[in-house]
Amino acid sequence: MQDAPAVTAGHVTALRLFDVCNAIDLVRAEDLWSRQARAGARSRLSGTPPKAVSFGEAPLALVLPPLPLQLGGRVTEAQVAARLYVFGVVTLAVRVPAQDLGWAEFVALVGDLDAAIGPGAAAPQWAALLTLLREAVGAAWDRPSLSTLEEDYLVATVHRFSRPVDAPTLGAQIDLVPLLSGEHRRLADAARNDLLSRRFSYYTDDLVVLTWDRAFIYEPTRDTDVADVLEVANAQLLEMRYYDELLDDELPRMYDLVEATRRWSFAPRRFARLARRLYTLVAEVTELTEKVDNALQVTEDVYLARVYTAALDLFRVKLVSAAVDRKLAIIRDTYQALYDESASARAGFMEMLIVALILVEVVLALNPRR
């Protein structure tokens, strides 16, 4: 749009989330980080009272060295931060400041950052940053993971425009569709409406628009609460995907072990060992998925709760979580069946032993000389 206001203050943030281990000891990680004279602190939402939201266990926020990036034909120094979550997820955030840019230039900056370190780019910077973090606090990672699962998200944030704007008329002054879609061609009306359907405002001068892999935030007060809950939702999605794939791999092995065990039905110890293995898996996954589910609880802040719930629905976190629950139920039922079968095998063995002893007594009774 020719008369679109310029962006006088804002930033674009690229997030990359990794599943690095089974769990992270955040206290130990904070201690390891502080020994190296580096900044680190437990996270909290900046603009929301503590009683309105509750972290299951607040993630550890760390500041990493700046990262030079080639954007739009010039080198830009990006700020880098990391967050460590107790359930084994690490988030890396690369933030590029945006000052005194026309709207078209701001949209171009979003596209340049996506092209430089987005999901479709060959970006070794993420691996280098993760290696730096692993060397610094990797000793606090319990059972490091070999998983290659990742999630990414792009957040474009504006704190101030060159002229006053309000949420109801913002869509008429700037075109958010190219920024949110990454497309240069004009989208069909149905696609545009769907892309802009998840819009949220609390005051007349703030706006949040969510899509699957990008978000636009207009926040004059510079609160980071919305960006923080979007990150938590992505972390929950990543971890639920990990457990979904873990159980997908485990179920065929479980079926094979059950069949192999049943061939040795006269050996109840085999049933007991497999049952214990399945029980341990169920207990471990259940405990960790509960930590993921309780990563953030929004209670009194209705607006933030709406944004957070919409993000969970959009990212399909609840659907993946339901799939994990179904697979856990299958394993629980299998465990119960094996336990019952093991108990039945033991009872059968005891009955055979009793019958054998009775036969021995009868034989001895009929042959008193023996």
Image (tube, rainbow, N blue to C red):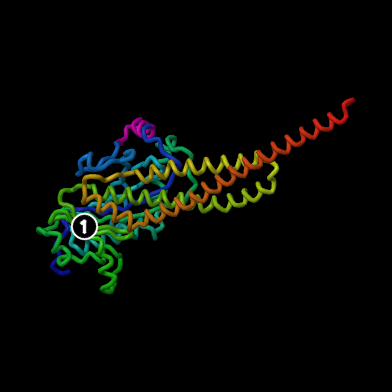
Q: Which residue is mark 1?
A: 200
Toward the left, the furthest residue is 164
Q: Quadrant of residue 107?
A: bottom left
Kindly identify the amino acid type of the residue bearing the numbered disc 1. Answer: Phe
Residue nearer the viewer, 249 or 83: 249
Question: Pointer 1: residues within 10 angstroms few (<14), some, or many (20+)?
Answer: some
Residue 316 coordinates in the image, percent (x, y): 37, 57
Q: Give the x, y percent position of residue 274.
A: 60, 43
Instruction: Find numbered disc 1 in the image and state the secondary structure of the residue it sits on.
Output: strand
Residue lying at 44% horizontally and 44% vertically, measured from the top left: 20
Answer with left or right where residue 159 lies relative to residue 329: left
Viewed as shown, does residue 102 lie left or right of 39? left
Q: Position of residue 2 (x, y in %)?
A: 15, 69
Quadrant holding the N terminus:
bottom left
Residue at the far right in the pictured view: 369
What residue do we see at 44% from left, 50% from top?
Answer: 325
- Residue name at image x 15 percent, y 67 percent: 172
Q: Which residues are magenta?
A: 28-40
Residue 269 lies in magenta, yes or no? no
Image x and y of residue 342, in percent: 62, 42
Compared to 196, does 152 lie above or below?
above
* Depth order, front residue of 86/140: 86
- Displayed quadrant of residue 26: top left
Q: Residue at x 33, y 40 (%)?
A: 56
